[in-house]
Structure formats: C-alpha cells, structure tokens
Amino acid sequence: MTGSLVVVGTGPGKADLMTPATRAALDRATDLVGYGPYLDRIPAGRADQCRHASDNRVELDRARHALELAASGRHVAVVSGGDPGVFAMAAAVFEAVEGGDPAWRTLDIKVEPGVTAMLAAAAEVGAPLGGDFCAISLSDNLKGWATIERRLAAAAEGDFVIALYNPASKARPYQLGQAFDLLRKLKEAATPVLFVRAAGTDEAKVVLTTLGAADASVADMRTLVIVGASTTRQVGRWIYTPRSERRT
Amino acid sequence: MTGSLVVVGTGPGKADLMTPATRAALDRATDLVGYGPYLDRIPAGRADQCRHASDNRVELDRARHALELAASGRHVAVVSGGDPGVFAMAAAVFEAVEGGDPAWRTLDIKVEPGVTAMLAAAAEVGAPLGGDFCAISLSDNLKGWATIERRLAAAAEGDFVIALYNPASKARPYQLGQAFDLLRKLKEAATPVLFVRAAGTDEAKVVLTTLGAADASVADMRTLVIVGASTTRQVGRWIYTPRSERRT
C-alpha cells in the first residue's frame, strides 16, 4: 500500500487566496491533518475524507501522526495557514522525518507553496516589502531570545524591511515591546511601523505608526508587524519601500 | 469617468499557482500592462481587453503608462510574475505615484498578493525557509553594490537563511560569484546552497551544493538561490531548516 503526504497552506484566510494547486491537493487527500481553525477554513470535501484536528503548539506530534497515516497507505494533506514553508508545518514534517522511522524517508512527500502572511499584509498597505527584507518569528518556544535579538540587530544593521511573525500571544505579551526597544536604539524614530491584523481576510485592519510611537499592545496573535527600512515611506494612503536607494 | 488599477502577480509560472483572486482581477481588467513573457502566461480574456506588453527594465515607464490609463477611466491590471510586492511592479507603481500627477494619489489602487519565487523554490526542495530568513535582490540597477554587500554581511551575522533574487543576468554575470566570496568569509563551507531554476513550473530543476563548492555560473535569470543558515540540513532527499536551534 503506497501512501503520500502533501503539506499545504490555506493562504491568509479568504478562499480566493488559496491556490488551485492546494485546492486540488486537498480534494485528493483521504486525510486532513492540522490545527482546528485552519481545517475549518476548508469546505467539506469528499465523503470518505477524515479530518484530524489538533491543538496549536503540538506541531511535531501532528507531523508524526500524519507520517504514520501516510506510511499506512493513506493520502494525507497536512494543513497550515499561509505558506506551509514559512513558520508553519513543512519544517515540522521534515523534523519528524529526521527523528522518526527510517522508512519515512522514502515516502512520497510534497510541499505546495502558498501566500504567506507578510505578502498579504504588504498588499493591504501598498508595497512595504519592495526592497530587501527579512522575516523573523518572535516566538521563543523553539529558539532563545538572544538569537531573536541577534537577528533583530542584524536586520537593523542591514537596513532590511523587517516582517515580524508571531509578534505576541497570551503566553508572550512582552516580546514585541522588547523588540521595539532594541530596534529604537538602532533605527530612526520616524521609521514607519505597520500593524496588519487579519491580512487577506474581510476583517483586515491596519494601524500605521512610527517606531518611536509604536505600542506593542496593538498586536495580537493574528497581527503581522512590518518595520520599515530607512527608505520606507508614505505616498497618498499607501506605504511602500522604493526599489532604489535614491528618490526617483 | 472612474478608473482603477490593480497590481497582480501570476505566481511562479504554473496556472494552478495563480490565486483565484488574481484570476478574477485579470478578468475584470480592460487593460493588462506588463512585461511580455508575464502577459503571455495569461489565457485570452474578454474580447475588449487590451494588452500593453513592454520590455523588462522599464518598470517606471510601464507604471506611469498604467496610471495614465487608470486616470483616463480604464480598469488596469499591472502584471508581475510571482508576488507583485516582492522585487516586482507594486513598488514601481507607488514610485510613479509619488513622482507623478497629484491626481494619481486619489486613484483606486489595489495590490493582490501572490506566490513569490522563493516560496515556490523552497517547496521544490523541502522547507529551507523553515527558520528566520531574508530576501535580497542582487541586481544593482537600482542600488549600489556596497549596499548589497552590507546586507549579505548582516544576513550572515544574523544567521538568516538567505534567498537571492536576480542572482545573475547577461549584464551582471559576476555578482553572484562576488556574493559567494563574501559569504564564504562569514559562513561555514559546508553550508547548503540551492540553485532552483524555474521553480513552480514543469521545468523546475534543483542543484544542491555547498557554499564552499558553489559555482555561480549555474545560475541564470530564472534561478533563485538559497543559502542555508547554520542549522539548514538534508534529510532523505529534502533540505530543511528546523524551527528550533537545537536538534529535536
């Protein structure tokens, strides 16, 4: 019996931001494995399709479960939000492969790309990622805060636009404020800062402020924070980063 | 007469990686403006739809033309590959707005997110962007090489996974080699390097090597280069960056 596993992302939320390739992969699957709220975004599929919903923060258990199902001959789709390769399930699946049954290394495993949150957030406000940029997860569940601080400092040193994923949660209410404090020492107070909540959904909400004035408590789990580069600026109601270092 | 302008990305190439939202925006447009090869990816639309193909490297002229059409009452879609906000047309449109007719600031302008090349490239090989990462364009048409070197050094200092867009062109055959030389001084020789050509198309081709052995001449205009972080590694036939700093 030959199973398979595909890791997909639903995109930021609205159905029309999920790629047709992901839609087709979901239709082919006999089993969907994922965090409950992401599975809830997917309309009912074939009648014989099983849904295995799990809590957040158990990614590795979820990945192992999906690999076991695929090894037993099922056709499994592991469902993330956004793009599955960006702070999502694809890395967890390969971590589970590395630490698990050697037979899992020969499984048919694919990853389908999707629209990750920072692209949807950027599109809501203009083109803030128009220059070189970086993406940093502020969650320290899996890496030390010192590593996060080192990356924030390097991002400032390189004058990258900075997209901050997982800026806050109930368990981590203080980190975004600490990140802003660090960046304030390294970047201009007038640097644009964007809080984009629920980007790519009908409830999208944008707060534009500056690094000097940014209030970390504006962010929650559904917020993506973008901190501009030195060239990031406003024109009309849009924020963008020019491709050039110079004014055009 | 009220026109509009939407900036869209076709995704990496295959039709099933273009979002339905982008498909719908293209269907609504009276005018498509873009680089010829990107327009060629789009199946024929409504009979009254005009296509305005242009050369590459004239982004700002193309953006101005699109804004003029929208100001005259047309419904214009500006077409990029990938995601329009990442090294593509969205920033050029807002640059043109900033430097152009003040009336353009009141136009109905939207950006539709898409699947950018690094996400498609990552999906071809596993999950190399599974940790913190950055995206740098090696094109120095619009920024100085010193800025690019500063960003490469900062990316190495932060131990980011590095996605290199526009790694090579006929006009710029030497830059990727210079970038590798710089990174070799700052990162381990065993660091995985991926050349992913035509990611997200049926012609996708992957070359896996190491920073020590990487040959810049492997890259061309259709290649996306990914340089790993210190934790990026191989399992089975996949390359991934674990979410954690430690082995799980």
Image (spheres, coloured by chain):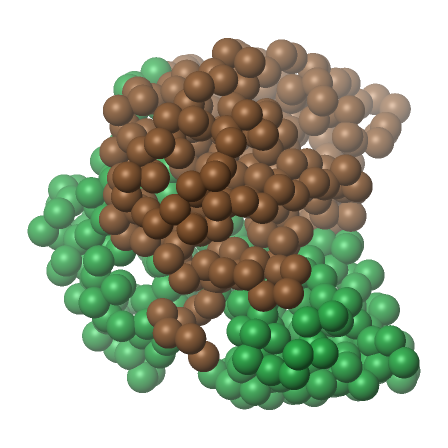
Chain colours: A brown, B green
Q: Is residue A1 visible?
A: no
Question: Residue B2 appears at what percent x and percent y?
Answer: 87, 76
Looking at this view, is A174 or A155 the one in front? A174
Q: Is residue B105 left or right of residue A7?
A: right
Q: Position of residue B186 (x, y in %)?
A: 13, 47
B51 in relation to B237, above or below? below
Q: What residue is drawn where x is 31% and y is 33%?
A: A182
Which residue is nearer to you in this view: A86 or B238?
A86
Q: Is residue B75 visible?
A: yes
| Residue B165 x, y percent position in the rendering | 39, 62
Which picture quadrant has residue B137? bottom left
Q: Is residue B209 above or below residue A130?
A: above
Q: Please, which residue is most extreme toward the left here?
A: B185
Q: Which residue is at a point 68% across and 36% down the rendered structure image?
A: A198
Image quadrant in which the C terminus of chain B is located: top left
The N terminus of chain B - image quarter? bottom right
- Which residue is at a point 77% across and 81% down the rendered structure image? B71
Looking at this view, is A6 or B172 the one in front? B172
Q: Position of residue A28 (x, y in %)?
A: 74, 35
In the figure, is residue B230 to the left or right of B205?
left
Residue drawn where x is 67% and y is 67% of the image: B7
Judging depth in this view, the residue of A205 and B33 nearest the camera is A205
Total number of numbered discs in the rendering: 0
